Image (cartoon, helix red, strand yellow):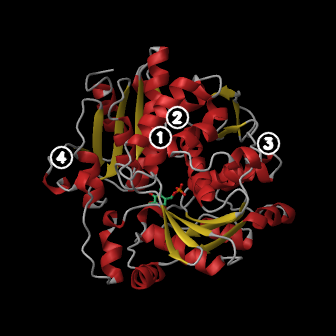
Amino acid sequence: MRYISTRGQAPALNFEDVLLAGLASDGGLYVPENLPRFTQEEIASWAGLPYHELAFRVMRPFVTGSIPDADFKKILEETYGVFSHNAVAPLRQLNGNEWVLELFHGPTLAFKDFALQLLGRLLDYVLEKRGERVVIVGATSGDTGSAAIEGCKHCENVDIFILHPHNRVSEVQRRQMTTIFGENIHNIAIEGNFDDCQEMVKASFADQSFLKGTRLVAVNSINWARIMAQIVYYFHAALQLGGPARSVSFSVPTGNFGDIFAGYLARNMGLPINQLIVATNRNDILHRFMSGNQYVKETLHATLSPSMDIMVSSNFERLLFDLHGRNGAAIAGLMDTFKQGGGFSVEQERWTEARKLFDSLAVDDTQTCETIAEVFEQTGELLDPHTAIGVKAARECRRSLDIPMVILGTAHPVKFPEAVEKAGVGKALELPAHLSDLFERDERCTVLPNDLKAVQAFVSQHGNRGKPL
Ligand SMILES: *Cc1c(COP(=O)(O)O)cnc(C)c1O
């Protein structure tokens, strides 16, 4: 399988290189040159497979040529073996034909574990083979950091540096990062906000001289391997609800458009999906595009669903690429306009094409809390605020009651106690067994000033299992 850039200028890469790449050299994102397509019979034959075996069948075409089948199978069995629920991604019924796909039974209680547990293992496999080491520098406002650290903690060939804004992540989220020890794990609290952290990561990718030749790898959802891993659970859910004979709809709590883009790919690979709902919080750039064909940046609002607090959705470029007939020059042009502060619209027929599949809704904090309370009352199920946004959007935007609606349950409610308290459901939140002593554990973290040079100096001092690069 070869991968090409959405801006058309960077060289095509194989899976191994795309795994180790960040942005393409032309500023674009990598996508498969040709998407695999499965027949209905083939998909139907996967019903009842354990999650890791389904994962093997769905993802195999993407890694062909880079990872032999036997090795890939072993990696997947290990990856999904760490999830605490036997079904890995169980479906729970909320209402008639309305389901939550619980994606929070991984080590850090959010869906990001599905991709990052795999990413860490794939990196180590590929690096071992090549005899290389890499450094990861990532920024987090919460969920990505802990999932990336959990995913990479056993990697022999990876040092991981995660930047979070000092005193601006929740205590559960901070402790999920700072209580994991290892000589290759480095938590840095920056005296600044999340944007400052993200800017430092971007600047580090732009000029990597401080790494003295060591390669820098991305763990945010611009990394293709993360998207790839998320395709699997769309197949998993549909197969349990009568697919592919029957089509299924999904409502996806959305920030950077990574998770829902995986659903779009699942559909293009042959899975009958009727409707994909983009559920956003008040940071609604995607809702404004889907409802009014305007892609325009606005100011950032802090919400009760912080993992979706974004101004720009990085993976949206991957959808735009397809909507424009995979014309890289057209995407480069749009992104240039956008970068210069202008928003854009796409031609009417391209927008109409997108709207055949996608609907959207923006849900504010009040509605989020109302939905948590409503669902708790109706079913006794306690939703996290991100999932609640998905439920609200599913109920507002649903096209057909005959088609099963699956809401992606992206996080466990214990990660976001503030929203649950505000919803007033009065149910005590308990950490799952493997995290029950989280508040007693020792923490390890370095506080650094909001200064790129200081951060880069720290990375080069500690980037080789705690020793200088
Ligand atoms: C990251 C995250 C999202 C948003 O996913 P995207 O792929 O960025 O759209 C939603 N909910 C939770 C809990 C998350 O951690």
Between 446 and 427, the one nearer to me in the picture:
427
In the image, what residue occupies the spot 57% across and 50% down? 48
Q: Quadrant of the N terminus?
A: top right
Where is residue 166 shown, x and y percent of the image? 28, 54
Q: Which mark is residue 329?
A: 3
Could you tell which of marks 1 and 3 lies nearer the N-terminus? 1
Where is residue 435 shown, x and y percent of the image? 24, 53
Q: CA distance from mark 2 to mark 4?
A: 31 Å
Instruction: Mark 4 and ligand 1: say if the CB distance to the nearest ligand atom is below 8 Å.
Output: no
- Residue that numbered label 4 is attached to: 443
Q: Which mark is residue 206?
A: 2
Q: Which mark lies nearer to you, 1 or 3?
A: 1
- Residue that numbered label 1 is attached to: 219
Question: Cβ–Cβ below 8 Å for labels 2 and 4?
Answer: no
Amino acid at the residue labelled 3: Ala
Q: CA distance from mark 1 to mark 3?
A: 26 Å
Q: CA distance from mark 2 to mark 1?
A: 16 Å
Could you tell which of marks 1 and 4 lies nearer the N-terminus? 1
Instruction: Mark 1 and ligand 1: say if the CB distance to the nearest ligand atom is below 8 Å.
Output: no
In the image, what residue occupies the spot 46% across and 24% down? 125
In the image, what residue occupies the spot 82% across and 60% down? 350
Where is residue 432 shown, x and y percent of the image? 27, 58
Q: Which mark lies nearer to you, 2 or 4?
A: 4
Q: CA distance from mark 3 to mark 2?
A: 22 Å
Amino acid at the residue labelled 1: Val
